[in-house]
Image (tube, rainbow, N blue to C red):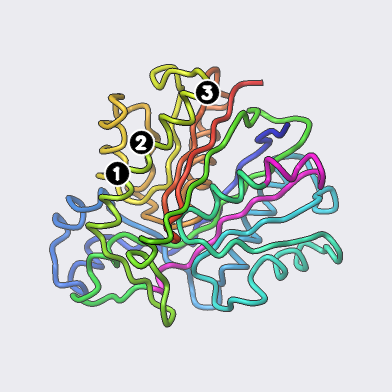
Amino acid sequence: MAHLRAFASWLPERRVTNDELAPLLGCTTEWILEMSGISERRYAAEGETVASLGLRAAELCLAKAGLTARELGLILVASGSSDRFCPGPAAEIAAKLGLAATPALDIPVASAGSLIALALATELAPKFGRVLVLGSEIMSRRVSLTPEGKNTAILFGDGAGACIVDPHEGMLRIADSLLATDGASAEILAMENNQLRMEGPSVILQAARKLPRAIADLLARNSIAAASVEKFILHQANLNLILRVAQSLKLPAGKFFANINLCGNTSAASMLVAADEYFSANGKCAGPVVFSAFGAGINWGALLAVPV
């Protein structure tokens, strides 16, 4: 058994509006908003790194949970944009938290990485104790701010999100999770030569099919009706995609939390950033909550949490 104990997030100070991007990308601000649902996103400052953003989110999350770093048994860090593959940001974050022996592992999966980390933390918490899950990304350095790169550049921003998975206590109990991988489709979303390559229409098409099916399968095997879910917190990929998932599940859009308008797509950080914003504003939930994400690999899935 495992619980969601606390969420936190950290966003860089710099706000990049559509007015700033449009001239660089050779498009209009209206087109950006129509295609993505995004008005602004955050960009990391020079000197900020995936590890430094993750560390900020980690410290805030520990403070919210009333814990010290030494009370953690494991750290999982999801990122698809780290400057270095090995060692990745997990070891650096652990060291800066003052930890010398606590295992800290990287999950290098863009967008879906934090969902994978939560699912793994659910299984590992009973053995390792409290797990700090982080998603941290600086995607602004992985896109091309040119007319040729506009379809990708309009989407992405930077940030970090965090969650404490506790084996004994929390605001929600993790009831079940479902993960899937389709390696045959992996080439539609990849990080190569430090640049993100994405076949946008193919990614949207696959995600719009796979996410509703995963959510429906997870709810069905737990005998929970989709209409009884209090909130769906998805990876904030694109507002149009979130709305398509809602339509596929025959649910009102209001059931799906969205903060992509002011944060953009922060890849593996986005679901945790959204969760922090939602729970900070609304407190504990009276009904089930579903988390879901789709990303590189191709990996996707869903996680169900229920009131304690």
Mark 2 to mark 3: distance in Å? 16 Å
Q: In the image, residue 148 lies at what x, y percent? A: 20, 76
Q: Residues within 10 Å of mark 1 (few under 14, many from 20)?
A: many
Is 191 above or below relative to 252?
below
Residue at position x 75%, y 67% in the image: 96
- Let me know if residue 131 is in the magenta part: yes
Answer whether labels 3 and 1 touch (C-beta < 8 Å): no
Question: Could you say whether the residue bearing mark 3 is in a helix, strand or loop?
Answer: loop
Q: Quadrant of the N terminus?
A: top right
Is 306 above or below relative to 192?
above
Q: In the image, residue 227 lies at what x, y percent? A: 38, 18
Between discs 2 and 3, the one toward the N terminus: 2
Look at the image and give the residue range highlighted in magenta: 121-142
Answer whether labels 1 and 2 touch (C-beta < 8 Å): yes
Question: Could you say whether the residue bearing mark 2 is in a helix, strand or loop?
Answer: helix
Query: Disc 3 designates what residue?
Result: 288
Three-letter amino acid code at the position of disc 1: Ala
173 or 274, which is in the foreground? 173
Three-letter amino acid code at the position of disc 2: Pro
Question: Could you say whether the residue bearing mark 1 is in a helix, strand or loop?
Answer: helix
Three-letter amino acid code at the position of disc 3: Pro
Q: Which mark is residue 208?
A: 1
